Structure formats: C-alpha cells, structure tokens
Image (tube, rainbow, N blue to C red):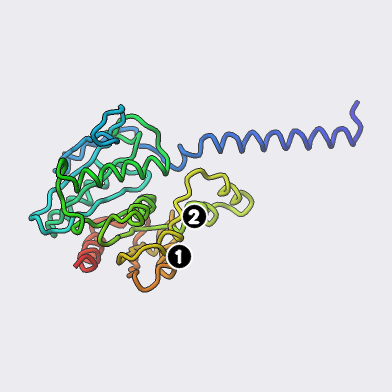
Amino acid sequence: MMSIGELSLFLFKTFCGLNGLILLVLFALQRKLVWPVPSIPVDPRTYGAQLIVIDKVLGRSNGEKIALAHYPASDRSAPVLVFFHGNGDQIGAGASFVGRKFSRAYGYGFLAVEYPTYPLSEGGNISETSAYEAAEAALRYLTEDSGLSVARERVIMMGQSIGTGVALEMATRGWGKKVVLISPFLSLPKLVGSILPDFIAWLRFLLLDKFMNSAKITELDQPICIIHGVRDEIVPHQHGEELAKIGGDKVQFYSIENAGHNDIFRSDLSLEVLRTVARFIG
C-alpha cells in the first residue's frame, strides 16, 4: 500500500504526464488548427474569375503548384489588388466573391493567391513560410513578362484576417504601392493570448507561425488602410485600432459598424467597404 507521500508523488507524475501529452498533441496539431483547410474545392470560375495554376518555383517544376484566381483589369492603368484570404477561406469562394465585386464596381484587376495544401493548389505543406513563398511566386508571375506583365506600380497588397500577415510580409519585401488590411491582428501569439482563457493563454508561446504584424507595420513606407468590424468575434476590433496606432501617420483606420469577422463583405456592408478601399487607392 502506498504511503501518502508516494501517492502524492504518483499523482503529481501522472498530472505532469497527462499535461505533457496534451501539450505534445496541441503542438503537433497546431497547424491544423491555425490552417483549417477547406475539404471541398470551389472553382473560382463559378464567380467568373480565371483559374491559373503556376509552379511554386517559377521556371522549374518541383511538384508544387499554386492556384490563382484572376480578374483582369479594365485597362492597363487600373490598380491590381493582390488578395490573401483568411485561413478558413479559399480562392474559389470568398476571395473570388470579393474580387468580382471590385472588378464589377471599379474595373480593378484582382489576383487571389492560394496557400499550399489548400484546394486547387498541389503539393507542399502549409506554414507561415510556405504561404510567403506562394505569395512571392504569385507576385513574380503577376509582374514578369512571362506572366501577366502588370507594372509593379499598379500593384496593391490586400489581406484579410490571417492574409493580412502575408500582405504585410510582402509589403516589407517591397511589393505593393499601397496596402489594405481587413480584420488584421497584432500578431498570432497576441491574438491567441487575447481570445483564450487566462489559464491556457500561455499556449501562445508554442506557436510555430507567428505573423508579427505589429513589428512589420513599423518597417513600411507605403500608405496603409485598415478596415475592421466593430463586432468582430474572432479578431477583436482593438487589434486593428492598436495596429493603426503603431503604424502612425501612414495608416488610415476605418471601423465598420455592425460587422463581425466573416460577414464584413455581406450585402448590406460591402458597398461601404468597397467605397472605403476605392477612396484609399485613389
């Protein structure tokens, strides 16, 4: 029979073991939680977009391909929005829906970029780094003569939710005359810390993908437009406000009343969002 001391030690070891196992499982599965890849692909041609598939490494096939949804600009002087969607979206769904709105209303060009392992892309693994690699490949294809041959000064970076992290990273690399961020967060660790209960908020330190938006926005010279729904239930409105303050005078911040996270482009709000972006682009 165990003594009280032995029993206490056994229970302590069991507790530590179970918590260690939980941590191990969460660490192993975190990318499935951060990147909930849709299981059913949606063809962007449903919304009238062109579907383009390129090699992730341009000019050399390594089995990895990146899918793009493209709406041509109305003329060769019109801005082209390069759009990076949220983690639960895909280029054939919300991204193409947004692109069609900008194409029809203003004649803007629009290029939505798919992430590795997401529907219509092929091969690879999804991570912060691989999302950046896909974005770089898409931007080179957009601007090079062997691709769509769009002048770099016409290109606008645009991201929504986790896509704001991709848009900001590309902007720090010199892409985009201007930057539009919809429902952005300060960083992924800070977002996790702000939405999880205090007793498990420390899990943010285990994140492999960090998207340090608050640090990157200070590096930019490009004008930035931040749009955030006041009722955002996933990325608190405060994140957009604080990001705008950190960015300083180069940032224009717009709150959208009655908008949450996934409904900011719904029919009764989309006109306000479209007009805000159009005024910013000029």
Q: Is residue 151 left or right of residue 128?
A: left
Q: Nearer the viewer, residue 234 or 258?
A: 234
Using the image as rendered, state which of residue 190 and residue 195 is in the foreground.
190
Is the N terminus in the top left, top right, bottom left or bottom right quadrant?
top right
Residue 259 at x, y percent in the picture = 34, 61
Say which residue appears at 54% left-offset and 34% top-offset.
28
| Residue topped by disc 2 | 191
Give the camera-side residue of 181 and 92.
181
The answer for how far apart the CA atoms under marks 2 and 1 are is 10 Å
Q: Position of residue 165 (x, y in %)?
A: 39, 52
Residue at point 90% right, 36% down? Answer: 4
Mark 2 neighbour density, 10 Å: few (under 14) some (14–19) many (20 or more): some
Give the total of numbered labels. 2
Secondary structure category for the residue under label 2: helix
Q: Which residue is mark 1?
A: 238
Q: Position of residue 170 (x, y in %)?
A: 33, 52
Residue 262 appears anywhere in the view: no
